[in-house]
Image (spheres, helix red, strand yellow):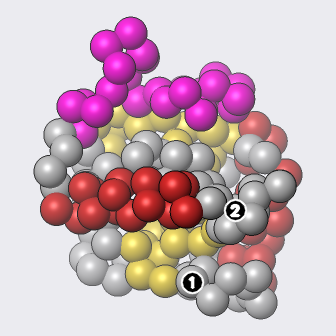
Amino acid sequence: MKRAWAFSCIVAISAILGGCDKDGSRNATQEPGASASQAQLAPAASETPSASGAQATVTKAQLPGEAAETLRLIKAGGPFPFGEDGVLFRNSAALLPQHPRGYYHAYTVRTPGSADRGQRRIVCGGPRRQTGNCYYTDDYYASFKRIAE
């Protein structure tokens, strides 16, 4: 658990400082935009352009069941299981389309069997309780898939 926390901190600091080029941390044999942990999701239905390049999409049906529950809680305005849910997401690494500060908020997607919050999150943009502009990450903000309506 301590190692996972330390690794998460390192990833977050790297993203904040922008010390890692968007493509610099990818394995040369991997598809662009993919990560080892994303292999469990079904292939993206389509690619849509965004401010930061091509953005993979995922349907709600392709998301883990826990993500559907998180989306339900976002629409309801909570209550959320973790105090950190709904906090400002700064998009420092510019992996999501650029918007003014305060546009994006991050929410935890529970990971079964995990002793902590895990690495799965949903980041939504726009007014609270809106889920029309949301993104899913299963690798703690290293990559995102847009959640198709």
Q: Give the range drawn in magenta.
A: 22-46
Say if the magenta span includes residue 29: yes
- Secondary structure beneath dot 2 equals loop
- Secondary structure beneath dot 1 equals loop
Provide residue 103's location: percent of width, then percent of height: 38, 77
Judge from the rendering whether residue 6 lies leftward or rightward of residue 19; answer left or right.
right
Spatial CA distance of label 1 from label 2 is: 12 Å
Query: Which residue position is annotated with label 2?
Result: 109
- Is disc 2 surrounded by few (<14), some (14 to 19) or many (20+) residues within 10 Å? many
Q: Which residue is drawn at 60% across and 72% down?
A: 107
- The amino acid type found where label 1 is placed reads Glu
Say if the magenta span includes residue 69: no
Numbered tag placed on residue 103 in the rendering: none
The answer to whether mark 1 and mark 2 are in CB contact below 8 A is: no
Can residue 71 be seen in the rendering of this structure?
no
Query: Which residue position is annotated with label 1?
Result: 84
Q: Which residue is drawn at 83% across and 55% down?
A: 113
